[in-house]
Amino acid sequence: MIISVASGKGGTGKTMVATSLALSLDSENVQFLDCDVEEPNGYIFLKPEIKKEFKIYLPRPKIDIKKCTFCGKCASVCVYNAIAIIKPEERRKGNVLFFYQLCHNCGACRLACPENAIYEEPEEKGELTIGTVNSKMFFAQGKLRPSESSPVPLIKALKKYIKSDKMNILDASPGTSCPVVQTVKNTDFCLLVTESTPFGLNDLNLAVKMVRKLGVKTAVVINRSDIGDSEVEKYCLRNKIPVLLHIPFKREIAVGYSNGIPLVSLFPEYKQVFKKLFHDICDIVEGKKA
Ligand code: SF4
Ligand code: SF4
């Protein structure tokens, strides 16, 4: 099974929930993939023993302008609008421009070019770190290269570590942009972590729309549930979204979080709570519960 843990906004306690869920289950069967590649911080709580680190390279298209006839076929196949063709004119040489910040390294332009004028060179996208937690739980995280603008290829590389016979927990970036979509899509379930505030509600609404568009089953965890108002509860009721867990505010949790101490280490009784959360998720995935 693949469970993604996401939140419409940052600071809701998403990683706290994802790591606590992972630590509450049978470690041998759990894989934790930190897909928040711009700011991975699951390792702070899980403290994995690192086994290997390696860079991820993807093919970057380049042009051999001498071969180019400026037919425009490469630009027309690029769905990301990452190519501009400047046709030659009487006093101006032609050119093919790649906008690498838009490029998703899909290779379509190279295949489309009838003149073999496009070739590829490896481009570093970031780093993958592989390890284990408590010598049992598989851990992997991606870290985007600082100047790199698209986290999507790195998340794709990370998701290759998903194993269908394991319980895969994917910690997504906050928000609802491309990296979150890339993380959540094709997962069996998305747990949305929110808080009972107007901002929390606004961003939860965006996250629910995104998850539903992807056709992924979802439910909500409300963190700091005793602070704020009841609008998130009412929203979930109206939209038939199960609220599977309320985590009340506790100063010790906040202090532990800032010191990298998982919730279930601070309050071991929460292990049972997260086990129940997991069973509720399984029931929803299997259709036993709405
Ligand atoms: S498809 Fe090839 S020949 Fe045509 S414009 Fe692009 S690079 Fe040039
Ligand atoms: S590799 Fe794909 S995304 Fe990048 S420029 Fe070529 S067609 Fe566009």
Image: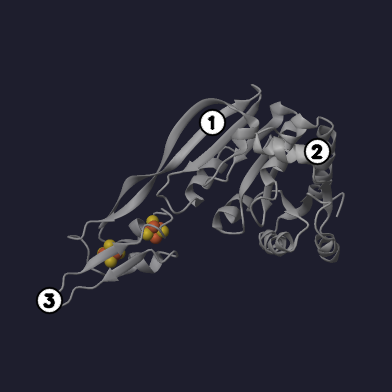
Task: Characterize the local packing of mark 1: few (<14), some (14-19) or many (20 or more) Cα atoms within 10 angstroms.
Answer: many
Q: Is residue 236 left or right of residue 36?
A: right
Give the secondary structure at mark 1: strand
Placement of the C terminus among the 4 image quadrants: bottom right
Q: To which residue does mark 3 refer?
A: 91
C-alpha distance separating marks 3 and 2: 69 Å
Residue depicted at x 44% and y 42%? 126
Q: Is residue 169 left or right of residue 97?
A: right
Pick out the residue farthest to the top: 135
Q: To which residue does mark 1 refer?
A: 130
C-alpha distance separating marks 1 and 2: 25 Å
Q: Amino acid at mark 3?
A: Arg
Q: Nearer the viewer, mark 3 or mark 2?
A: 2
Q: To which residue does mark 2 refer?
A: 274
Image vertical order of residue 22 relative to residue 116, above or below: above
Q: Is residue 227 visible?
A: yes
- Ligand 1 falls in which quarter? bottom left
Task: Characterize the local packing of mark 2: few (<14), some (14-19) or many (20 or more) Cα atoms within 10 angstroms.
Answer: many
Q: Amino acid at mark 2?
A: Phe
From the top left corner, tell me how far across and down residue 176 is, in percent: 61, 59
Q: Closer to the N terminus: mark 3 or mark 1?
A: 3
From the top left corner, tell me how far across and down residue 178 is, in percent: 55, 57
